[in-house]
Amino acid sequence: MKLAGSVLEELWFAEDDSDDATQSASQSLAAKLAELQGLKPFPAVAQRTLGLLNSPDYRVSVVARALEEDPSLAAGVVRMANSAMFAGAKPCSSIDQAFMRLGGNAVKEVVVAVATMEMFPDQSGIGKRIRDHCAATAALVQFLAREFVHQKTPGIFLCGLMHDVGKLMLMETGEISYAEQENQDVLAADQLHLVERTTVGYDHAVLGGHILSGWKMPDPIPKVVAWHHQPSRATEDKVIGPMVAVLRIADQLDYRLTGDPDNAELYLEDCAETADASYIQLTAEALKAKQVPLLQARHDALSLFS
């Protein structure tokens, strides 16, 4: 089925909805995407920087000067390069040194991460919870993928950071009032997207995948984000399946830790009993053995993006 407007079928639901319902929902999503493109375009300096970095013969000095056109973005890149998620032996104080530390591919991720989070600087209440959850999930999924996924997971940090960007966008436009969801569990993993589908015909994951595709985020990031509430569909793809599984584990783990940080070991055990953990062959023993650095990575991410 070809979906309406700028809505991409590969980023839509796997479920077989009726033609009328799918057409109506896709038209609503297309209209929402058009609205968001005007409301929240991806920052121009970040776009230009990524364009330079995509050239095989880019020059570090040229990229650095482009980044420095946005002092806040440049400072954020240096700050992230010095964070526990990326840090090396020595602190760096400039974009040039950040390149030496990280390399071009990691700088791309850092630029996107900083630019995206700076698009939502004034969040409070539920908005702040969602933003913090995105930051924490990014750190958790990066750590878990590095330790427990035995294949490449390109862009997994950005998948974590932007997996709920659709929620932040829906809050910007007032499409859904998350504050009206009185039950905290409704905001948790694998719950809210069902409310969203009933309310507007699509969910934050599908919206986020389309937004990232429009921002020209590289594959497979848009699909991983779009499908993170469609695990059965994701497992049909050998690259995306493990990425969605580890993202879902990180997503669920952070929700549990946010609600009750004192029972981390219990939550690690619970996460190890999920179908996602089974899919990547992650055991409770292996997960608990990494508890201290895993929780430290989450703490550092929350401090970095606060």
Image (cartoon, rainbow, N blue to C red):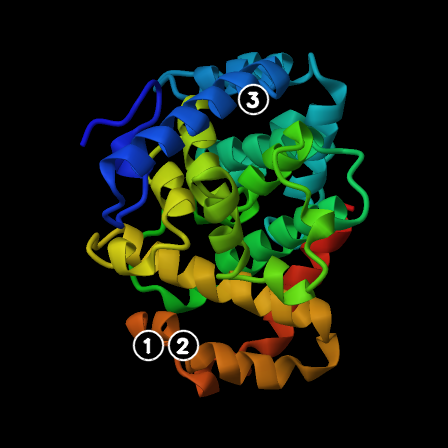
Residue occupied by mark 1: 278
Question: Label for residue 59?
Answer: none
Q: What element carries label 1?
A: helix
User: In terms of depth relative to the viewer, which is nearer, 180 or 63?
Assistant: 180
Residue at left offset 51%, top offset 36%: 109
Disc 3 designates what residue?
36
Tag 1: amino acid? Ser
Q: Residues within 10 Å of mark 1 (few under 14, many from 20)?
A: few
Amino acid of disc 3: Leu
Callout 2: SS:
loop
Which of pointers 3 and 2 indicates the residue nearer the eye? Answer: 3
Q: Are marks 2 and 1 in contact (CB under 8 Å)?
A: yes
Q: In this view, does 242 lie above or below 205?
A: below
Mark nearer the viewer, 1 or 3 = 3
Q: Report the Cα–Cα distance between label 2 and label 1.
A: 6 Å
**Where 55 sits versus 142, above or below?**
above
